[in-house]
Image (tube, helix red, strand yellow):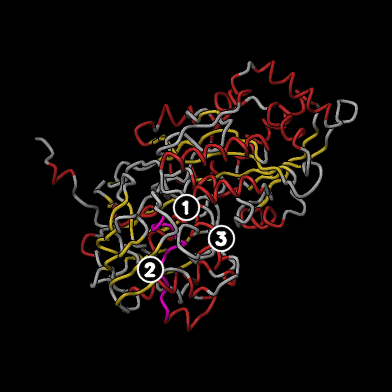
Amino acid sequence: MFATPLAAQQLAAEQILHKGNGAEPQSLDPHKAEGVPSSNIMRDLYEGLTSEAPNGDVIPGAASRWDISADGTEYVFHLRPQARWSNGDPVVAEDFVVGLRRSADPATLSHYSQILSSIKNAEAVTAGQVPPEELAVEALDDHTLKIVLKAPTPYFLGLLNHSSTFPINRRAYQEHGARFARVGNLVGNGAYRLKDWVVQSHIELERNPLYWDNANTTIERVYYHATEDQSSELKRYRAGELDWTHEVPLNQVRWIRENLNDEFYVSTYLGTYYYGFNLTQPPFKANRTLRRALSMAIDREILVNKVTRLGEQPAYSWVPPGISHYAAQVPEWASWPQEKKLAEARRLYAEAGYSKDKPLHIELRYNTSENHKKVAIAVAAMLKQSLGVRVNLINQEWKVFLETRKQKRVTELFRAGWIGDYNDAYTFSELLHSKHGINDQGYNNPEYDALLEQASVEGDFDKRRALLEKAERLMLEDQPIMPIYFYVNKRLVKPYVAGFEPNIMDHHYTKNMRILAH
């Protein structure tokens, strides 16, 4: 009469999961990839020293435990002796040493190497001042790894499930070089292995029988589908082709609420949606007045209440709410009535030399997505109506868009979003350091860099927090970016996908899921 818990958990005969994954992944090389689509897949293919529980808590990964010195600067990790790579090689401490050195080596051309700056000597290595062998990581024996930090780093264990810290299979790398992360070559230590990659269609992973926790893994195969068009993704979900969407089309939220509300998840997300100004080229180079005028002319309340409509919060600052041991740094003008903001925006616009008779003409660039387009159209309309700015919208495919932003040659105003790599304000602060590989604005303020460098070696958590908050206030005064809103997660998940749990990082490991009978 009543379903027992066991019956409720009866598994489907076929354990295959189809996930919508946004844009085509840029790469599966853990030390070169960037962007959420790549990261989602790499969490299944590789395993860091630490991992994450379904609720986002940091848990043991390739290391079963660790010891931390009394002063918080030395970590000794004890690797699982039973861990194997997908080719059968044992996972040993030297694999992590080689991986971390490669990640920090400027020859790798990683745009993420700055993320390793908490490790002693990392900054000198990434700057090319000392060889990678000087990075303070050491294999004490096959199953014991020591990492020495510059200073106590509260987020360090969380950082170790980021792909930049993943190990590398030395045999595969020696054999294939830069092509080691391709189909047929990739050797991982995660719960799944790469089986197929059909460009602009899908990536297929299959269960890795050599994974140390394979006995507790259920799903046999997982497909990551490239889906830049949210309406098409929704159609595929409704047709049963997808079990999980990357996001949902904003213009169909009402229908989803009315018809699929039990499968619709909206939750807090550690991310900021923003527009970046290219500070290396006209018209925004050395023109803070103009940048401030445009930022003040945007009505963020209308954007979140009329355009996105899923509970996003208007953003006037950079670090999102929910970050541990940090207070939001909101500019004073954020609380002004919109009419007062507009009046000041018009004054600044005129001070910058523009008017309705002499309007600013700019390009607003975004990656292909109907949701991004919807926001861009609204922002362009606001700028035209309030200031008379003429905005030309340009969309590009994800990989092209990333490269265009990085080159800083033709970009003017461009869409961006940053999702925290760990729960600490530094994951946002460091993105605007002048040497960060993803500082696509070209922001360069030595005082800002100095505050971050002081914070990175400050052992007193309250003093560290004060330094990071001061850095954010300084950056907001410089206005290299236009914060728009703080993200929420928004996706559909079929009711038969068990093990899914929304979390603030939006990190989900297929090994924690299973397909129930349906």
The secondary element bearing badge 2 is classed as strand
Q: Does the magenta stretch include residue 168?
A: yes
* Residue holding disc 1: 457
Magenta residues (range): 159-170
Residue 193, which numbered label?
2
Residue in the image at 54% along x and 45% along y:
429
Q: Percent from the top left, x then y, of residue 473?
A: 59, 35
**Which comes before the other along the chain, label 1 or label 3?**
3
Position of residue 488 in the picture relative to residue 416 (left or right): left
Position of residue 511 in the picture relative to residue 100 (left or right): left
The secondary element bearing badge 3 is classed as loop
Residue in the image at 78% along x and 42% along y:
286
Dot 1 surroundings within 10 Å: few (below 14), some, or many (20 or more)? some
The residue most toward the bottom is 175
Residue 26, which numbered label?
3
- Compared to 130, does 439 lie above or below? above
- Mark 1 and mark 3: Cα distance apart in space: 33 Å
**Which comes before the other along the chain, label 3 or label 2?**
3
Q: Percent from the top left, x then y, of residue 468?
A: 52, 41
- Quadrant of the frame with the N terminus: top left
Dot 2 surroundings within 10 Å: few (below 14), some, or many (20 or more)? many
Q: What residue type is labelled 2?
A: Arg
The residue most toward the left is 1
The secondary element bearing badge 1 is classed as loop
Q: Percent from the top left, x then y, of residue 78?
A: 26, 67
Foreground mark, 2 or 1, reads: 1
Residues under numbered marks 1 and 3 in contact, where contact means CB atoms less than 8 Å apart:
no
Q: Which amino acid does label 1 sit on?
A: Val
**How many numbered marks, from 0 up?**
3
